[in-house]
Image (tube, helix red, strand yellow):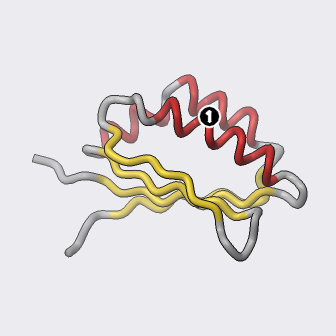
Amino acid sequence: MSQPLVVIATLIAKPGQAAALQKHLETLVQATRQEPGCITYELHQDLESAEGFYMFERWVDAAALQSHDGTEHIQAFRAAAGDLLAHFEIKRLNLVA
């Protein structure tokens, strides 16, 4: 049996684009939470920098995450948010303890 996969996505908006990015991210959250294999999908905003957003994700396994990457709503988000982002990084983690 595979173990759940944890993902932390860091998304930094370009100056003046935080509100627009947040709107797209909130739409993404709603759609993603309906996906099979999604355990947790939470959007957080940095308290010190309004341009910083962090998505904390937990998936039943790597296959569920891979399926998520191919969904229409992820593809739409990438197309819409590309011009809003100054930085985007994904970390995939295994639970150790």
Callout 1: SS = helix
Identify which amino acid the numbered label 1 is placed on: Thr
Q: Residue furthest top?
A: 72
Q: Which residue is mark 1?
A: 27
Q: Determine whether, in the image, residue 10 is placed left or right of residue 21.
A: left
Q: Position of residue 51 (x, y in %)?
A: 76, 62
**Would you place residue 24 above or below residue 56 in this image?**
above
Seen from this angle, which residue lies furthest left? 1
Instruction: Return the residue nearer the eye: 62 or 30.
Output: 30
Specify whether 44 is left or right of 37.
Answer: right
Residue closer to the observer: 67 or 47:
47
Tell me the residue at 38%/41% (across/down).
Answer: 65
Location of residue 87 (image quadrant): bottom right
Report how many numbered discs are placed on residues in the image.
1
Residue 74 higher or lower than 61, as above or below: above
Q: Tag 1: Cα neighbours inside 10 Å, few (<14), some, or many (≥20)?
A: few
What residue is drawn where x is 72% and y is 33%?
Answer: 79
Task: Where is residue 89? Give x, y as percent.
Answer: 60, 60
